[in-house]
Image: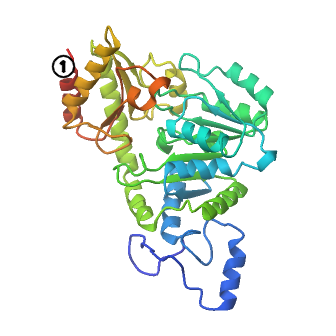
Amino acid sequence: MKKKDVNSSRIPVYRDAGFELFDADTTAEAFRKETENEREPDLYIYSRYRNPTVVAAEEEIMKLEESEWALLTQSGMSAIDTAVSIFHRGKDTRPWLFFSEIYGGTISFIESVLKRRRGIEIHNFTATRQKYDLDDYESLLKSLKPELVYIESISNPMLIVPDAPEIIRMAHRYGAKVMVDNTFATPLLWRPLEAGADLVIHSATKYFSGHGNITAGVICGNDHSLMQAAVEYRKYTGHMISPDDAYRLHTQIQSLELRFRQQCLNATIIAELLKEAPGVKRVLFPGLADHPTHAEAVRLFGNKGFGAMITFDFAGDSEKEKRTLRDTFIRTVADKIKLIPSLGDHHTILLPVESVWGSKYPEPGMIRLSVGFENTTILTETIVKGLEATK
C-alpha cells in the first residue's frame, strides 16, 4: 500500500464505495489502467475493484506466505471459487483432479457448481488406508493429463498429510498447475509456493483471524498472469472483502505466530492425553507416530509443529454406545469447549464428525477438536473431565 497521509501507526479504514477522480482525463486514465488488473492501482476507482485497506491487509499475508501477491476475498469458499475459476476456459478446459480428502464445502462446490452448473470434467484421487499412493497418482496423471491438481496440506477431518512436494513435482511434469489449500498448516508450518505450488489458498476465517469473528479468504501466488486473472474474476463476481473486515484481519494477523505456536503445543499435549485414554479407540493427529502420514508430516513440517486439529474416536460395542459416549463427552465439556462448526478459534471447539460428514465418515463416536490457545492446564482438566464422564 502506498504511503499513508497521516502519522498513524495503523492502517486507515477506507469505507469509500467510489473514489474521487477529479476530472474527465483522470477518469479515462484510471479506467484505461484498470484493464491491466494490477493488485494495487495508481488510482482507486471502486471498492469492488480494489480498496487501499484491503491492499494493506494483503501485504501482511504476502509477508507470511513470502508470495509476490495475495488477494483477499470475503470467505474461504469465495477464494476457492476465484482460484479455480481462472483455469476454466469453457470447452477448452482439460480435466481437473482433486484429492479426495478435502473440505466438505469444497466437495459440495465441486458437485453443485463445477460439475452440474459449469460442466467441468472433475476426477478424484482417493486415499487408501488414509494415505495417498504416488504410483497410482502418477498413473492417473498419465491417463488424465489434468490441467489442475488440488490438494490440502492437512486434510479435514482425517488429518492426512500428503507428500506434497513430490505431488507438486509430478503434476508439473505432466503439465498440470497445482493449488494447495494451506488453511490447516498455515505458512508457519509450510509454504507451498517454496515447493513450486502455483496457487495457495486459505480460509482466513480460521487461523489468520483466529478469533471466530471474521469470514475471509485469500489466494497467494507468484505468477503475475494468474494474479491478473484472479483480480479480474474477483472484480466481476464481487468476491471482495469489506474494508472493515480487512482492517480487523490486518490487526489479528499480527498475533498469528504467538497464537498458532501455542495451539500446536496444546494440540500435541491433548493428542498424547487422548492416546492414553482407555475409552478412546484411536486418535488422529499427524504428530503421533502411529498416524498413517506421520512420516510425511515430519518431512513437510520438520520441528515446527503438526497443526492444532485432532480427530478422535470413542470405543464402544455398538453404534448406540459410541454415540452415547460421544454425546456424554460433548455435554460434559460444553461450558469450556463449545460445539461450533468452524475451527482455528482462540478457544478449543469441537464438531461431531458423523453429524457433519454423514456417510463419508460414518463413525458415530468420532469428534474433531480444533484446539485453541487457552491455558493448557484448564484445557487439560476439561478434557480429562469429559473423558471421566464417559467411563
In the rendered image, residue 5, in percent from the top left (x then y), is placed at 46, 81
- The answer to whether residue 151 is left or right of residue 311 is right
Q: Residues within 10 Å of mark 1 (few under 14, many from 20)?
A: some
In this view, which residue lies farthest toward the right?
92
Residue appearing at x 71%, y 70% in the figure:
35
User: What count of labels does the image hold?
Assistant: 1
In this view, which residue lies farthest toward the bottom?
23
* In-front residue for pair 204/389: 389
Q: Amino acid at mark 1?
A: Glu
Residue appearing at x 26%, y 19% in the figure:
324
| Residue 113, quarter of picture | top right
* In-front residue for pair 196/357: 357
- The answer to whether residue 19 is left or right of residue 280 is right
In the rendered image, residue 67, in percent from the top left (x then y), is placed at 59, 53
- The answer to whether residue 245 is left or right of residue 166 is left
Residue appearing at x 51%, y 31% in the figure:
155
The answer to whether residue 165 of the structure is visible from this angle is yes
**Disc 1 on helix, strand or loop?**
helix
In the rendered image, residue 218, in percent from the top left (x then y), is placed at 53, 53
| Residue 245, quarter of picture | bottom left
Quick one: quadrant of the C terminus? top left
Residue receiving disc 1: 388
Whether 293 is drawn above or below 174: the answer is above
The answer to whether residue 280 of the structure is visible from this angle is no
In this view, which residue lies farthest toward the front?
116
In the rendered image, residue 374, in percent from the top left (x then y), is placed at 25, 41
